[in-house]
Amino acid sequence: MAKLSLRNVLTNFYIRAVTWRRGILVGSDELGNQYYRAVKPGQWGREPRWVIYPNEDEASMVPAEWHGWLHHRIAKPPTELPPVHRSWQKPHLPNKTGTEAAYRPPGHTLEGGHRERATGDYQPWTPS
């Protein structure tokens, strides 16, 4: 969890004040993220878009369809143009790196540090 400091509190207050004054709510996702667009075009005529996270700010908590809209890859947000979900697609999961749920292969130091011996079919490359 992020350390609560005066700077974090002021930054959070500023972001919410700017969002309240200059943002239009476009929609939200199943994770509770809220997506906004600016009332007026920004610098260089591009529409500013941003997300407000419900808890900790974690960019991997943005699903692919909203990521595309945030980065101007698609013009309409998923609330206006629902994304096409394929049968092979898995549901969105946030990045688990650095947590207890992170993947650790066999032999990892936090998984005992021992792995099975090589089968003997490995031939290292040697320069000729």
Image (cartoon, rainbow, N blue to C red):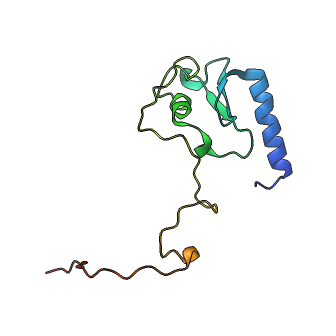
Q: Residue at x 41, y 80 (%)?
A: 116
Tell me where residue 85 appears, x and y as whole percent: 46, 30
**Residue in view at x 45 percent, y 38 percent:** 89
Q: Nearer the viewer, residue 110 or 18?
A: 110
Q: Is residue 29 left or right of residue 109?
A: right
The quadrant of the rendering that contains the N terminus is bottom right
Instruction: State the image coordinates of residue 29 (x, y, percent, origin top left).
Output: 64, 31
State left or right for residue 5 relative to residue 36.
right
Describe residue 100's horizontal placement relative to residue 106 as left or right: right
124 lies left or right of 91 = left
Viewer-proximal residue among 98 and 3: 98
Q: Quadrant of the C terminus?
A: bottom left
Query: What x and y, as percent, mark residue 104?
Result: 52, 67
Closest to the observer: 71 or 6?
71
Which residue is located at x 50 percent, y 20 percent? 75
- Residue plotted at (57% across, 45% down): 93
Q: Give percent across and percent down for residue 72.
A: 50, 27
Most distant residue in the right direction: 6
Which picture quadrant has residue 63?
top right
